[in-house]
Amino acid sequence: MQVKIQDYSIQADSFFSQGMRCEAHFYRPNNSTANLPVVIMAHGFGARMDFGLQPFADAFVKAGMAVFMFNYRGFGQSEGKTRFLVNPFMHVQDWEAALEHVKQKIELNPEKIALWGSSFSGGHVLRVAADHPEITAVSAQVPFLDGVPTALQTSPKIMVRSAWAGIKDVFRKLTFRSPYYIAVVGKPGETACMNKADSEAGFRNLIPNSQNQNWRNLCPARIALILPFYRPISKLANIKSPCLLVNATNDTLFSPSTIYRAAKKIKDVKLVDLQCGHFDPYKGRWFDEALAVELDFLKSKLLD
């Protein structure tokens, strides 16, 4: 498949992670030469690459950068026996595999690779960069950085419900049964992975209209037991690459103070505050502001 869109083409691609094929799209500027710089992208918690990433990719590729965008195992058309499984350690494996695949593409410059992530994947790109000093630049938008304070923001009642659901899910896995699911997003007070006042509307606003009926608001509940142990912030001092952190000062999911602490750990960092909520940088005014700083940053590192 190759789809012509204005100044670039989108080609279907794929790579293998832990023996499973991951779905990807390769954006390439039309009439481009070899040795292109590239931005690798993936989405956040419980989402897919068609949930709000296209406008960012569109701007990056029109500026002269290739884009490699992918779905994690278990999402979209990517393989994975357990569907909708959110496991950050598996996600990092997928990022590592995507990075190695991109390095082998003859059209691309292996010395000009940037990682772009948002929300959950914002933490992943920083975690991967900590082990890969060859990465040229990292852009992390409203990133998840520390599972401990995130878990502590949860009410005791919801924490107990989620933990019990996670235990039931693990037991079902150990007894070779289908997962026990909880919701990805819900209203305040509901047992859901994201249940702040703006979570459900904000997340659903990312889903393309054509996919609204197909998306399932499900996540294997074991994530409730895994999440506190995922702490990208603990690795940030190892990052050698220049980093951009885009912080939403009104974020109700992840504490902005965690991002301020993170910025102090990274040697080469630019921190930008946007006076908005967690889901706002994907559309409208706040998308324009986020894109402007991200595009300038990536152009300065990949094109200058």
Image: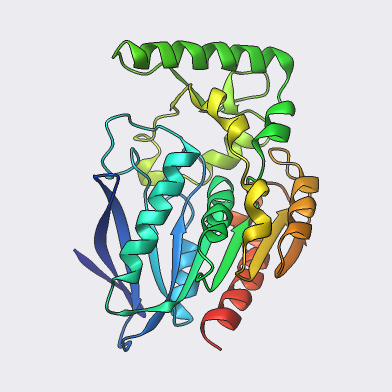
Name the residue: 68% across, 61% down: 245
Residue at the left extreme of this rendering: 1
Q: Nearer the viewer, residue 130 or 269?
A: 130
Q: Which colour scheme is used?
A: rainbow
The image quarter in which residue 158 lies? top right
The image quarter in which residue 237 lies? bottom right
Q: Is residue 67 above or below residue 176?
A: below
Name the residue: 63% across, 59% down: 238
Q: Quadrant location of the C terminus?
A: bottom right
- Left or right, 287 with respect to 21, comes to right
All told, the count of numbered labels is 0
- Left or right, 231 with respect to 4, comes to right
- Left or right, 271 with respect to 242, comes to right
Q: Which of 248 and 186 is in front in this view?
A: 248
Name the residue: 68% across, 38% down: 253
Q: Can residue 246 be seen in this view?
A: yes
Q: Is residue 10 above or below residue 302?
A: above
Q: In this view, does 47 lie above or below 224?
A: below
Q: Is residue 208 visible?
A: no
Q: Position of residue 58 (x, y in %)?
A: 45, 70
Q: Position of residue 22 (x, y in %)?
A: 29, 49
Q: Where is residue 299 in the image (x, y as percent from the top left)?
A: 56, 80
Q: In this view, does 247 lie above or below 90?
A: below
Q: Where is residue 290 in the image (x, y as percent from the top left)?
A: 65, 64
Q: Quadrant location of the N terminus?
A: bottom left
